[in-house]
Amino acid sequence: MKKIAIIGFGGAGYNAAREVRQRDAEAVIDVYSDTDTGPYNPMLTTYYVKGAIPYEALFPFGNLETIQKELNLNVYTNRPVTALAPGERKVLFDGGEAVYDEILISTGASAVMPPIPGLDLPGVFKMRTAEDAMELKRRLDGGEIRSGLVIGASWVGIKIVEDLVERNIPCTLVDGAEWMFYVAAFQETALRAQRDLEAKGVKVACGQMLDHIERAADGRLTAVMQGGGRFTADTVAVCIGVKMNTGFLRDSGIAMNRGVLVDRHMRTNYAGVYAAGDCCEAVDIQSGAHRNIGVWFNANKQGAVAGANMAGGREAFDANVLVNLARYLDYDFISIGDVSACGPEDEVYEYEDARYYIRAVRGGKDIRCINMIGSADSNGVVKNAFIKAIENPEAELDIQTICFLRKRGFPDGFINFLGGRSLD
Ligand SMILES: Cc1cc2nc3c(=O)[nH]c(=O)nc-3n(C[C@H](O)[C@H](O)[C@H](O)COP(=O)(O)OP(=O)(O)OC[C@H]3O[C@@H](n4cnc5c(N)ncnc54)[C@H](O)[C@@H]3O)c2cc1C
């Protein structure tokens, strides 16, 4: 009877457990979690804050008790794993250790709170966990917040802006980078997103690096920027990035950059040790290099692939490609591919009408990055076309994709850019 261990029970951990159980009814599955909540979807936290979904909806796989029974798991709650000894196939925690045959590291990531003075003041918060969401909702529902400052024009920051704007709370968004969504957006795209936000009453200030946060006698907070700028509000959300929860692997010998390095089968450098989700760096199919792409789809898929392989399968995750998606305040923006891979010599395709803004860049035969605004119902199809173009730059788009994109009003120029051909 195989003994499987899973460290961390988010989307990646849950999907791994489910896949193991589907393939192996006999396996013992031990899950170690540092919380006592069931696996939840962190991207839904801001929807809960704004009241769009109830608390229970954060848990898409059901409650912990039901999951435990359905999948026949031993779930050890409030038991953070403190170290791993892969040579001896041992997992260590406070006051004990346990052995395993195959193990998955699926410990996710945490919001970064760097040692900047003032980040520990009351009223300064981050957004990652269900507890973070409950605390913000409590303060908003209680009327404690009459103005908000969001530091970090990121995928998380923009959702906090939405939570504030929908409650008519004046809000300022600042970022140290030159433009919004810097790691994924072309400047041309970001300026459009910024104009839209400003039209909705949000003040946006880019190129503003935080120095420290001060608290006045009346409890209001002022973020003082390195260039001397000052932004005052009742509350400050710090959304400036994430760090992978891999500290406990420090002396384990597991190969890591910022995250655990895995191949397409989610295997690490140690036999029997797998990693999946936000804590890992899988092979980016665009560059061929390891890259952390911390999105819900990847966490679930990578977890399922790892689970299948721990149960003796030979599955691969072949869709590790940079995708950043933001949907907020009736606006949507997606970036597919690596904006930083685009150079001044590359060919640029640009299109704008009342519905879409598209900016896409190609270097030779390789599509490097696509930014689209207004394309929410077609994002999956374009992403798949992008992945196919990476796998085979010579391949033409299939007829179904061409018809789909035409029906949605995409211009022929863009369809051709993606590898389409004339059907007339
Ligand atoms: C506000 C917000 C908005 C987001 N928006 C989007 C979006 O629009 N689209 C999208 O695709 N993705 C989005 N994401 C990202 C997405 O939610 C994550 O990529 C995904 O949930 C990662 O799942 P995971 O299982 O890898 O990690 P997690 O969900 O972080 O789960 C890891 C678990 O491991 C536990 N753990 C950590 N260390 C240990 C230890 N030593 N021992 C035991 N347990 C441990 C953690 O407490 C946690 O429960 C968003 C995230 C946030 C926070």
Image (spheres, rainbow, N blue to C red):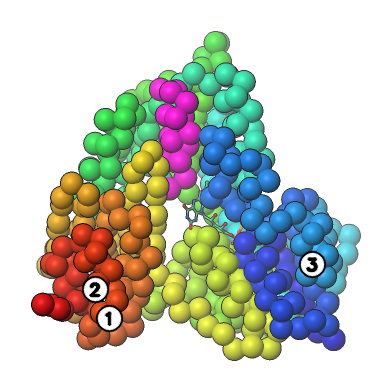
Which label is found at residue 70?
A: 3
Q: Are marks 1 and 2 in contact (CB under 8 Å)?
A: yes
Image depth: mark 2 or mark 3 in front: 2
Q: Is residue 205 magenta?
A: no
191, 263: nearer the viewer: 191
Q: Disc 1 marks which residue?
A: 398
Residue at 80% across, 81% down: 25
Callout 1 secondary element = loop
Q: Is mark 1 within 8 Å of ligand 1?
A: no
* Neighbourhood count class around disc 2 (C-alpha, 10 Å): few under 14, some 14–19, many 20 upward: many
* Residue 195, percent from left and from top: 24, 36
Q: How far apart in space, not on screen, are marks 1 and 2 (Cα)? A: 6 Å
Name the amino acid, label 1: Asp
* Neighbourhood count class around disc 3 (C-alpha, 10 Å): few under 14, some 14–19, many 20 upward: few
Q: Is mark 2 within 8 Å of ligand 1?
A: no
31, 85: nearer the viewer: 31
Residue at 36% across, 34% down: 174
Above or below residue 202? Residue 340 is below
* Quadrant of the drawing holding the C terminus: bottom left
* Quadrant of the drawing holding the N terminus: bottom right
Q: Disc 2 marks which residue?
A: 402
Report the number of discs: 3
Q: Earlier in the sequence, mark 2 or mark 3?
A: 3
